[in-house]
Image (tube, helix red, strand yellow):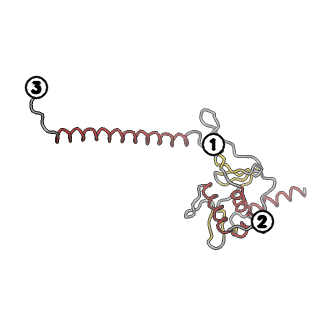
Amino acid sequence: MGSEVSSTLESETAAAGGGPLPPSSRYIRLGPFQVDQRRQEVTKNGVCLKLQGKVYQVLLALIEKQGEVVTREEIRVRLWPADTHVDYDSNVNTAVNKLRRALGDSFDQPLYIETLPRKGYCLIIAAEFAHSPLPRAKAQDGAPNGSLDGGRANSAPAKSELWSTFGVIGLILTGMLLGAVITKLWIMHFAPPVIGGPA
């Protein structure tokens, strides 16, 4: 019974935004993203994102205090030992910016990470803790697919790229044809008339 209460308290503390992540929860979900704590990887709709060690640690720091400010000093202490001599401000900025890029987030209109000037950063999306991963969606032919709506999301960009290619080819051919017509008219207009035939 004591372990059940302890587990419940840890889950509630993490859900409230304070303290370490629940040790019993392997997976953390942030909107379309899933963090696998055991493998230390982040995926979006089944596709693995490449997060370097320090960038991953910044994400965990934000998740541990979701909805609260994580100061730049807290990030510095987490990422570098006390005896490390680096430009902390620049490196913290770099790590947070890399995390934003990986998540497809924006500084101006944040969806996940908000910057609080002269204070730090805040995770503004709720994290959910789970014991099992999100099921991977399957395409209509039954093949695994990272998209949650089957193959439709991937086919739309492919069709638009195909039409773009046809459009470019059409413009090139039109330009070549127009150039040939203009050249022929120019030659006909400025060429001296031919009088008589060969002798």
The single residue placed furthest to the bottom in the displayed view is: 118
Q: Residue at x 57, y 63 (%)?
A: 107
Q: Which residue is mark 2?
A: 81
Of callouts 2 and 3, which one flags the residue occurring earlier in the amino acid sequence?
A: 2
How far is the residue under mark 3 from the one under mark 1?
Answer: 79 Å
**Residue 7 placed where, x, y %?**
84, 57
Q: Which residue is mark 1?
A: 146
Q: Residue at x 79, y 57 (%)?
A: 22
Note whether 152 is above or below 40 in the view shown. above
**Residue 77 placed where, x, y %?**
75, 67
Note whether 157 is above or below 116 in the view shown. above
Give residue 100's quadrant in the image: bottom right
Mark nearest the camera among 2 and 3 is 3
How far is the residue under mark 2 from the one under mark 1?
Answer: 38 Å
Q: Residue at x 71, y 59 (%)?
A: 54
- SS at circle 1: loop
Q: Residue 18 bears which disc, if any?
A: none
Of callouts 3 and 1, which one flags the residue occurring earlier in the amino acid sequence?
A: 1
Query: In the rendered structure, which amino acid carries the disc numbered 1?
Result: Gly
